[in-house]
Image: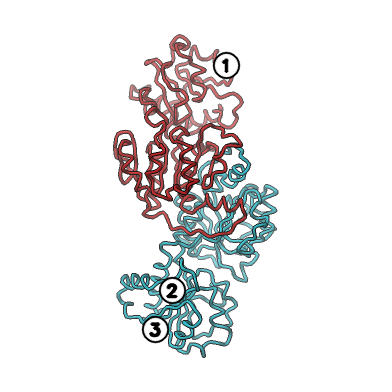
Chain colours: A red, B cyan
């Protein structure tokens, strides 16, 4: 099978290397016979795409590489486009994707990293770390005491790979974990799971609210000003999903008013956040630059393991575990 | 048995209340017959101390309440002084304490709270949160990626109640946990345990170093400038012990030089840290105001449960589990 890896130009940190490919193939000996090419520029893409059956590429390049109507002509043998992101919102709408090509996301790669970031963020909110950061800026020594996580309630909106990684750790700390998802399939690491349309009834009981869902037409603006008001006073908020999932100005207003106890935001509107944006200086707000889910050491090895698992399914005629439903967007 | 609870004057948050006493007695029915008095002022202390067999009090009042030579005359029936702190360094040296009176610390009360604070601090250091806090002050969006805790090495100096709580959680995250303690008794949550005098050989292998030991003559200045230099470049440092356990200026110099990757300090020299102290503004430093180990909701109930466990041992003629050895200081 002919596989082409199209790396982002000049991105040395996350580019998939030939050495990483060899390591992954040594873990999956049945994949050792794959015929693989690597490129990071337009010429390399043009040379490889006509013969490629599988392309592994970064999500933010997808629509540029495959403009609407280009497929299948550009790549007549193409069966699979595998992406290195969990969230495919930059590639929506999927009108450029013919039914004959399976689009894969990279869900599963981020679970441990996002899980650790998420439980760190919850512990920081519990322990008043956003307030202490504000105090540190002022040189103010003022104790604020906290208890432990045991028995506290966390509502996790989106319990896929990212949210599931957080749910598992939250349970290990004795928290009560309430998952909210499209549909209401139970999740092994949640005490309860509820459909998204019941969110209004769930928010008043949340000590912590974590947003870890994909950005789709259904989730855009999900955490509205009205829903923020439904959270109990002092609640902590974490967003590792996407900025447009919440009404960001309403979040900042709620922090300034003291309604929210604190917030850890790994995603913002826009990204990067401009230096003079109010969000940097809103009391109780901790901003990180979209790093919650990317494991520098293990990212590419997991990405390739997941790709090989899907190619194995393709070879055996089974459904591809990471295939995205364009109608749902994830 | 006659018990007197001497609360700190005006400290409403941590004062032991009669309601908390009744709740604790309901969990320990064999203690329901204790004759208890409460006071927070000098008059109340003077009225009660002559008859008291047991006093429960705050550590920082000990030397004022029992000046050298005052015992046993001041309290001829006194058998036990129970304190609400884990660390008794404010009461040292113990030349005011006759052999006939057992001094108890409050070890065990802080394990869960300190454990959660400690793993939070390690996760923050792993995830570059001190650097992101610096960037947030400047309004700078610049990604720094991190991996997960699995396989990373944490050296914990002092694996009593506080350090043990951290060790247990660090192991749950897949870390390699190296305990350092007086003697070298194995600890169930450490992969290795070493005596303090081997520290110089251990520091070069530490991804993270946690100080959670009591402050005694042995540990004062333990983390010297020379030992900081033995840590690998980029190591993370956590101090929930006492400020004098490290050379604080050397820590701040190592952060400024980029030798240390970051630091979370819950204790400082002096406390409170003055507003103009360099420590507030040293890059990579996160300061919290001595709150790591005090669980606001559960502190007093655990304190009383531990007191009753010791009084039960006293009644039965067994060694008191929380008795402090004045020669060791803990």
Residue A71, given in percent of the width and then of the height, sits at 44, 12
First in residue order: circle 3 vs circle 2: 3
Q: Secondary structure at mark 3?
A: strand
Per the image, the residue denoted by label 3 is B2
Picture mark count = 3
Relative to B136, say whether B241 is above or below.
below
> Which label belongs to residue B235?
none
Relative to A64, say whether A110 is above or below.
below
Question: Looking at this view, is A330 or A6 the one in front?
Answer: A330
Determine the residue located farthest toward the front in the rendered image. A257
Residue A99, given in percent of the width and then of the height, sits at 37, 16
Mark 1, Cα crowd under 10 Å, few <14 / some 14-19 / many 20+, is some
Q: Quadrant of residue B321?
A: bottom left
Q: Is residue B211 left or right of residue A97?
A: right
| Mark pair 2, 1: CA separation | 71 Å
Q: Is residue A251 left or right of residue A155?
A: right
Q: Secondary structure at mark 1?
A: helix
Residue B133: tell me if it is visible. yes
Per the image, the residue denoted by label 1 is A44
Residue at x-position 48% and y-position 45%: A255
**Chain letter for mark 2:** B
Residue at x-position 64% and y-position 50%: B260
**Chain letter for mark 1:** A
Mark 1 on the same chain as mark 3 = no
Relative to A51, say whether B40 is above or below.
below
Residue A189, given in percent of the width and then of the height, sits at 35, 44
Per the image, the residue denoted by label 2 is B321
Q: Is residue A17 left or right of residue B102?
A: right
Answer yes or no: do the residues labelled 3 and 2 have beta carbons within 8 Å?
A: no
Q: Quadrant of residue B157?
A: bottom right
**Chain letter for mark 3:** B
């Amino acid at each position: 099978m002919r596989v082409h890896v199209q790396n982002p130009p000049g991105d040395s940190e996350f580019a998939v290397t030939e050495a990483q490919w060899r390591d992954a193939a040594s873990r999956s000996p049945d994949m050792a016979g794959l015929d693989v090419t690597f490129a990071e520029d337009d010429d390399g893409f043009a040379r490889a795409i006509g013969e490629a059956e599988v392309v592994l590429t970064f999500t933010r390049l997808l629509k540029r590489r495959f403009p609407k109507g280009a497929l299948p002509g550009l790549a007549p043998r193409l069966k699979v486009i595998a992406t290195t992101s969990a969230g495919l919102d930059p590639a929506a709408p999927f009108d450029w994707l013919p039914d004959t090509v399976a689009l894969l996301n990279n869900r599963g790669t981020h679970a441990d990293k996002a899980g650790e970031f998420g439980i760190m963020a919850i512990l920081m909110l519990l322990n008043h770390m956003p307030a202490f950061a504000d105090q540190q800026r002022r040189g103010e020594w003022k104790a604020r005491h906290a208890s432990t996580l045991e028995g506290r309630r966390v509502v996790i909106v989106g319990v896929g790979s990212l949210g599931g990684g957080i749910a598992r750790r939250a349970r290990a700390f004795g928290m009560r974990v309430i998952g909210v998802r499209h549909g209401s399939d139970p999740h092994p690491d949640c005490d309860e799971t509820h459909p998204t349309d019941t969110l209004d009834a769930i928010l008043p009981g949340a000590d912590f609210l974590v947003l870890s869902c994909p950005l789709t037409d259904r989730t855009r603006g999900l955490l509205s000003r009205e829903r923020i008001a439904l959270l109990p006073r002092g609640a902590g908020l974490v967003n590792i999903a996407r900025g447009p999932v919440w009404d960001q100005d309403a979040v900042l207003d709620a922090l300034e008013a003291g309604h929210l106890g604190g917030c850890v935001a790994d995603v913002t509107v826009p990204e990067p956040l401009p230096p003079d944006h109010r969000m940097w200086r809103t009391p109780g707000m901790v901003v990180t630059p979209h790093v919650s889910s990317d494991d520098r050491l293990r990212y590419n090895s997991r990405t390739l393991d997941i790709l090989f698992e899907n190619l194995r399914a393709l070879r055996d005629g089974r459904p591809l575990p990471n295939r995205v439903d364009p109608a749902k967007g994830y």
